[in-house]
Amino acid sequence: ARTQIPPSLQPETPLFLLATAGMRLLPPVKQAEVLQATCDFLRFHSHFKIDRPSEVGPCGSSVRIITGEEEGLFGWIAVNYLMDGFKGSDKERTTYGFLDMGGASTQIAFEPSKDERTKATDLIDVRLRLLGGKEIHHQVFVTTWLGYGTNQARERYVGETINEYEATRAMLHAPASTNEEHV
């Protein structure tokens, strides 16, 4: 951002740092410590506009932990922006689905077909304004699974493998029982 935004405009340019599932896995005390340290660092080392403290956090909305649904929705928007999924007329526009298996969570987001949208009750309304000023509207299904990213899945697999190994080893090294009675 420093190379793209002239120094004279940095104080009026908002900066956003949004944490994802790895932060959601931390206990609240650790989350608060990381958010505070990040906020302090950005205020000291950056000239960009950072929100004042609020109920959201020490840097307001500038530095915060997003929900899994937000993570999925932001990914869906990014993919469709990069793939030109928002171009064309409303009738011919086809958006792309999004599946992200991150380190700590997995998200799926997609815009159901028109028929399916009429039946669904759990869609997120997304209104975007294109560069030309036209507003577009989408209804997106988003779901998320905290703890089902690649790192978390690997940790569970390794933990289970170690437990199985330890159980097998304990059985192999257990003393054999005897039927002799001791007097």
Image (cartoon, rainbow, N blue to C red):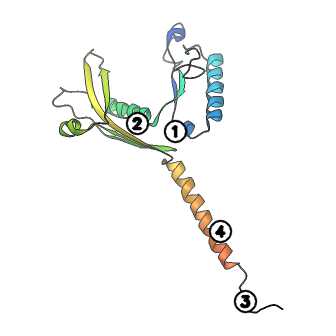
Determine whether the residue tagged by mark 3 lies in a helix, strand or loop. loop
Q: Is residue 93 above or below residue 2?
A: below
Determine whether the residue tagged by mark 2 lies in a helix, strand or loop. helix
Give the residue displayed 68% in from the left and 73% down from the top: 170
Q: CA–CA distance between discs 4 and 2?
A: 38 Å
Of circles 1 and 3, the one toward us is 3
Q: Evaluate whether residue 27 shows in this view.
A: yes
Q: Earlier in the sequence, mark 1 or mark 3?
A: 1
User: What residue is shown with label 4?
Assistant: 166
Seen in the image, is 28 located left or right of residue 78? right
Q: Earlier in the sequence, mark 2 or mark 1?
A: 1
Q: CA–CA distance between discs 3 and 2?
A: 60 Å
Q: CA–CA distance between discs 4 and 1?
A: 31 Å
Residue type at mark 1 is Ala
Determine whether the residue tagged by mark 4 lies in a helix, strand or loop. helix
Residue 178 disc label: 3
Residue type at mark 3 is Thr
Residue type at mark 4 is Glu
Q: Evaluate whether residue 84 shows in this view.
A: no
User: What residue is shown with label 2?
Assistant: 72
